[in-house]
Image: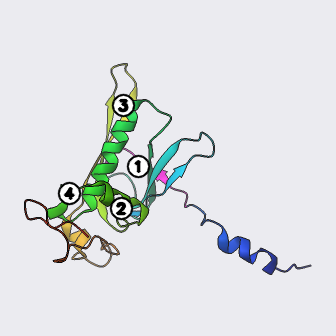
Amino acid sequence: MTFDIGQYSADIANAEFDRVDRDFMEEGTHLIRIEGVPAITSQNTGNNLVILEAQIVSSDYHAPETPVKHLFQLSGVDRWKVQRNLSQLKSIVSATLPAEARHLVTADIVNRAFSEGLCVGAVIKVIVKKKTSKNGAGYLAYSFLAGPDELNRGDAPETTAPSGNNWNVSESAGASDDGADVPF
């Protein structure tokens, strides 16, 4: 017996896309291509999270093309953790900007990076190190850096070139005091 899938078509079309099952980044040095940065409120805890969703370009731990993620909790944790996460998110936005504009991270640029997805497609470097806290507990420390310029400009071979860095630095863009173009 069959049924009419049409009765569900509007619900399916209006549903959110299913999330890809992703691994957390492990200790090592990774080049990742950003695939998304959704900002969500957890249904379980009510905490605000930003999820860095990416794919491995190269890594000394993960296989190429492995889907990976990293979570940044912006509420429901100690203030120092929120500040660390805010600093790391700023580093990610900076890493996606053209080299001449990396110091120009403003609230508008951050909003565009995450809300409009302008950082999607950029390749960044993530260094993950095992460390030990003052209390003797082990943890992973993450550093987010700009990836190789050739991967973000598309100069690399087709197999590793990103779909494109979406920041446009044009002559019509505003200029900062030091002459560097603002990327919009």
Mark 2 secondary-structure assignment: helix
Please report the bounds of the magenta region as a residue range: 20-29
Task: Measure the alpha-carbon separation of dots 3 and 2.
Answer: 24 Å
Q: In the figure, is residue 160 to the left or right of 103?
A: right
Q: Residue 51: which numbered mark, if any?
A: none
Tell me which label, 2 or 4, sits earlier in the chain.
Answer: 4
In the rendered image, which residue does mark 1 sit on?
Answer: 25
At label 2, the amino acid type is: Ala
Q: Could you say where residue 67 lies in the image, as x and y percent from the top left? A: 46, 60
In the rendered image, which residue does mark 2 sit on?
Answer: 113
Mark 1 secondary-structure assignment: loop
Q: Nearer the viewer, residue 76 or 31?
A: 76
In the rendered image, which residue does mark 3 sit on?
Answer: 80
Please tell me how crowded label 3 is: few (under 14), some (14-19), or many (20+) other residues with Cα within 10 Å.
few
Q: Residue 104: which numbered mark, if any?
A: 4
Magenta stretch, overall SS: loop
